Amino acid sequence: MEIISANYIISSPTYKDCPPPDKSEYAFIGRSNVGKSSLINMLTNKKGLAKISATPGKTQLINHFDIVSSDKKKWYLVDLPGYGYATVSQKARNNWGNMIESYIRKRENLVSLFVLIDSRHEPQPIDIEFINWLGEWQIPFSIVFTKTDKNKPAATIRNTGAFLTELSVKWEELPRHFLTSAVTKQGRTEMLDYIKGLNQSKSGR
Ligand SMILES: Nc1nc2c(ncn2[C@@H]2O[C@H](COP(=O)(O)OP(=O)(O)O)[C@@H](O)[C@H]2O)c(=O)[nH]1
Ligand SMILES: [Mg+2]
């Protein structure tokens, strides 16, 4: 599957302000700076589509992009605000939590979340906790390990393996996962094919 067109539509402060839930939707989430915007640009082959932020943690909005793919399907990609940025206040963190929880649990056309994890690091509690919440809420998701070009292959294997092992403490079945790089485009075909499959099988929850 290829992307025919990708366009920015709107940034919304809450799920209630989002565009009509009339197409399948895929949302990207993860820590600030993990590479969400870069991944969206890589998947869509459009460099300036999602803004690659020099000051992480600033955008607290739900960003919608309109996608048309070569299988003649129309769908939404969503760039969600990142979590775990150290210098934001407790109040801002609570706001983020409420906003994201509402979006994730109430957005009726959300087919799947992609949770981005930086492949350069050992498992981080904040990521594991977030994923465990998704389990609690029964949200379909997969894991995208980012920035593999920054590692030696052995480090990618070690870090991603450790992360999945850590998840298996609570999860009987491990989620689908992808190894990606916005620089080498590793994982692009796999992710687009995965979305294609989901587009065929459902149009919402
Ligand atoms: N080498 C490399 N750098 C990346 C990759 N993805 C993102 N980055 C860099 O990491 C920083 C944060 O990326 P961004 O997409 O803005 O992350 P976001 O905050 O999650 O949206 C930027 O400086 C990017 O250029 C990648 O796959 N490889
Ligand atoms: Mg971003």
Image (cartoon, rainbow, N blue to C red):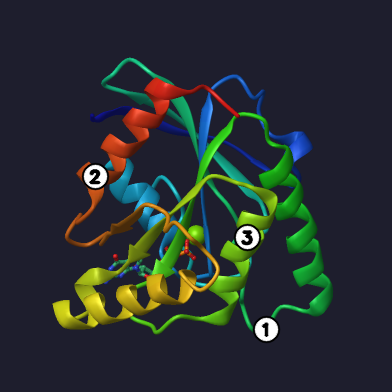
Disc 1 is placed on an element classified as: loop
Mark 1, Cα crowd under 10 Å, few <14 / some 14-19 / many 20+, is few
The answer for how far apart the CA atoms under marks 3 and 2 are is: 28 Å
Q: Quadrant of residue 184?
A: bottom left
> Does residue 49 lie above or below 116 as drawn?
above
Q: Amino acid at mark 3?
A: Thr
Decide which of 129, 63 is in the foreground and name it. Answer: 129
Residue where numbered disc 2 is placed: 190
Give the percent coordinates (x, y) of residue 97: 75, 62
Residue 87: which numbered mark, if any? 1
The correct choice, above or below, for 31 with respect to 49 in the image is below
State ligand 1's quadrant: bottom left
Q: Are marks 3 and 2 in contact (CB under 8 Å)?
A: no
Q: Mark 2 to mark 1: distance in Å? A: 35 Å
Which residue does the image show at 73% across and 38% down from the upper left? 106
Q: Residue at x 55, y 72 (%)?
A: 128
Quarter occupied by the N terminus: top left
Q: Secondary structure at mark 3?
A: loop
> Does the beta carbon at disc 1 come under 8 Å from ligand 1?
no
Say whether disc 3 or disc 2 marks the residue closer to the N-terminus.
3
Residue carrying label 3? 59
Residue drawn at 76 percent across, 53 percent down: 99
Specify which label sits upstream in the sequence, 1 or 3. 3
Question: Which amino acid lies under the numbered mark 1 shown in the image of this protein?
Answer: Thr
Q: Is mark 3 within 8 Å of ligand 2?
A: yes
Q: Is residue 58 left or right of residue 182?
A: right
What whole-number distance in Å separates the C-alpha atoms at marks 1 and 3?
14 Å
* In this rendering, the label closer to the viewer, 2 or 1: 2
